[in-house]
Image (cartoon, grey):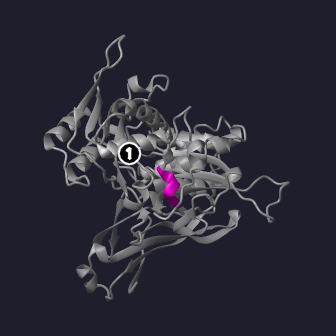
Amino acid sequence: MQTLVVEDIPARGIIEIENKEILEYTCDYKMADLKRLSFWKKKFKLPKSLNSCKSKELIGYAILKHDIAPSRSVDEWHVFESVFRKYPHKHNCVPNPSNHVLAVGECDFSIPGVLYCQQNGLNKTCAHVALRSLLSRRPGTEDISYKKINELAASVSKGSSFDPSEGLTVEKIRAVLKGLGVGFRDIDYTKHPKHWRKTHPYEKFLYAGVESGAGALLGFHFSGPKVDRKKKKERHIIPFYGHTFNKDTWAPHADVSYFNIGAGVGYFPSGSWTSSFLGHDDNFGPNFCVPRLYIKPEQADYVVELLNNGVAYDGVYAEAVSSSFLYSLLPWFQDSTNEWLKRLCEWADAQQVVLRPLSVQKNTFTVHLRANRDWEGNKESSRVTAFLNSLLPDMVWVVEISVPHLFPANERKLGEIVLNAAIRPRQKDPVDSAAFVLARVPGWYIIAGPPRKGKPRSIGIYPSRVVSHMPLMKCG
């Protein structure tokens, strides 16, 4: 930073809404101050020099709010909101960063990043700010006020009084997401047997939500010598929106059996090469790298994988069902002369393929196919990608298929399983599932025909110009 601009600003929009809401709960509340700080890469003097500044020179901004409520023993500043650019590390992946617009002086600027907010102990807690942080990224979603979050949360209070300063329960978080029309998959580990923490590991749901750009929430309780075991556990929830990709990570072969879906159906989840999740903690600050297993499984109480608009089921499920599709289809190609297809079959026989689930719009997938070349320089024809675009539903799960020596070191793949993201698959007969759209392997497409009443869907096999490995889809 070369220049810091500090401005006094009036309470408008959701800040004004918040002030009025706090007065409903705390009659002696007042906002004592409100400032906006902006941080710049270049040196300049106000006011005229600001007109020559460009958005790319803005490092970040923060709106600081001073709340006073004597009856609640509150006289504190907090970060109402802030956004900072992701620092340029090529292995830090932040899918779908939102673009935030702000005024500095009388000039408008924009900055990409993920909104960070802090609780104030009056009308918002860690759950409120975590929800607002992730929901601010959703396309077409207006900035959510805390008053709206509290109204939705209060709808499941079952006649009891609702005090937002006491936090949001699992039921209230679900009510907020449902009320806003946000799809999600969650697990309340406190309502399941202990073995669920092992059979349904929280990090897989975090990874699936993060990799597709919708994000995820993790609720946990604190542990350690300072925690009084006789008292109620102290709980916290934080949002995650990105991850690091570690090419040097060694995924032990024993992990394959850990994610078996059935007999002879095993795979490496691509999250095995994630060393840290990127997230905010309103107690400490924004944009932290949290090691993937830093929070012990026995401390995890609640995990939420947010789903993109138009997506009906979660990435963990898409990944698992796709493994069944893959192992059902590959026997058709055991006698192939394509060297890379033969290798894929060999790795599948060893149950060591790598699967990476992404929920995307169909155009994202077809543009990716059209824009990239395989290792021999081959490119898919525009006629084929245009046909695929007409065939695909609006939202799809693209589960990329790779192998251990290609995925981490070269960030490349051998194909995809594509599922209709709006139709939950049937696991009993996965190849004939209504969710299956197509699969691509080196040199070939396997495309499912339209549903036929009372009859199995037909499966067609068509040639592809892409005969070897090609780059993974970019996550950010």
The x and y percentages for residue 412 are: 35, 54
The foreground one among 382 and 362 is 382
Give the extent of the magenta segment: 270-277
Please tell me whether residue 354 belongs to the stretch shown in magenta: no
Determine the image quadrant of residue 461.
top left
The x and y percentages for residue 57 are: 31, 78
Is 454 left, or right, of 115 in this rendering? left
Q: Secondary structure at mark 1?
A: helix
Is 344 left, or right, of 73 in this rendering? left
Which quadrant: the N terminus?
bottom left
The foreground one among 164 and 326 is 326
* Residue 201 makes an appearance in the image: yes
Residue at 43% from the left image edge and 55% from the top image edge: 405
Please tell me whether residue 273 belongs to the stretch shown in magenta: yes
Question: Tag 1: Cα neighbours inside 10 Å, few (<14), some, or many (≥20)?
Answer: some
The foreground one among 146 and 16 is 146
Amino acid found under the numbered disc labelled 1: Arg
The foreground one among 53 and 28 is 53
Considering every residue shown, the one lying at the far left of the view is 383
Q: Is residue 394 above or below residue 100?
A: above
Q: Is residue 156 above or below residue 232?
A: above
